[in-house]
Amino acid sequence: MSLFLQRVGNHVGPRTYKLCLIQSHHITARQVCPPVCVLSAGLKNFPIPRNYDHVEIPEQSKLKFYQRTPDLVKHVREPRGIKMLRGPADPEQTVLIGKQYGIKALSPGLMRWGHFEMIRLTINRRMDTKTMWAKWRIEAPYKPLTKKGQGHRMGGGKGAIDHYVTPIKQDRMIVEMGGKMDFEVVYPMLREIAQKLPFQAKVVSQEMLDEEEKEETWKQENNQNEFTFEDVVKKNMMGCCQYISKYDREWFGKYK
């Protein structure tokens, strides 16, 4: 027995051949087997691209410039105000308005004017204004921080205003992007920005936020532990309220 390659008609393709078994005496010297060329490694199943016809590009698609100092009639030297960083952010500050992509803060912190410029220059230089848009989700620096000169002795009152910052709470959106592009296009750009921020942050999409919400709901519904941290604090088991922080009694260990 020997192998002979016989051509298939127009059912599969003009250059596709099938393998048949025939007797060796049926093959003569003049018969030449046609070449076989099946590019199985080149066959790819690409996903169907998404439809972004419903996405509208605003007129001002780039991030606007923020000033280093606010326009105030009188600059007041405020206290440090650590309470501005504690607790959760407002509900409208933790969602994506465009339902696409953004950067989410995982811990509280203070953003200086240099961080705003880093974000603005990185996005505006790399984005395509015809198919992308970006928008700030935080205010310009407005909180003053004071500092005394180097070598100055203690006393003499509060120091002069050195710079302005913007307090950022946990789970707040820093910047948001959208347009007619996939998540893989903007992820490297936003990841580079998130790694340079003075607090922990990550790149998120609307699908990721929906999955996190579903996972949190599933954990609460399928929790097999009879004693959760919230129940222990509310019922003051073993007198725990006198040992924990007042912020844990209010937010049950979720926020600092």
Image: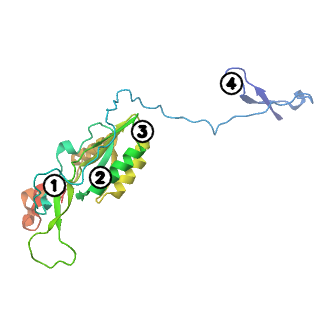
Q: Which residue is mark 3?
A: 128
Residue at 26% from the left image edge and 38% from the top image edge: 97
**In this rendering, the label closer to the viewer, 1 or 2:** 2
Q: Position of residue 74 (x, y in %)?
A: 10, 55
In this view, the residue in front, 227 or 49, is: 49
Q: Is residue 207 left or right of residue 46?
A: left
Of pointers 4 and 2, the one earlier in the residue sequence: 4
For disc 2, the neighbor class at 10 Å (few under 14, some 14 to 19, many from 20) is many
Q: Are marks 2 and 3 in contact (CB under 8 Å)?
A: no
Image vertical order of residue 15 relative to residue 105, above or below: above
Of pointers 3 and 1, the one earlier in the residue sequence: 1
Q: Is residue 91 visible?
A: yes
Q: Quadrant of residue 92?
A: top left
Q: Number of labelled discs?
A: 4
**In this rendering, the label closer to the viewer, 3 or 1:** 3
Q: The disc labelled 1 sits on which kind of residue?
A: Gly
Distance in Å between CA atoms under marks 1 and 2: 23 Å
Q: Is residue 95 left or right of residue 43?
A: left
Q: Position of residue 194 (x, y in %)?
A: 34, 54
In this view, the residue in front, 249 or 199, is: 199
Q: Quadrant of the C terminus?
A: bottom left
Q: Secondary structure at mark 3?
A: loop
Distance in Å between CA atoms under marks 4 and 2: 58 Å
Q: Which residue is mark 1?
A: 87
Q: Residue furthest front?
A: 73
Q: Which residue is mark 2?
A: 116
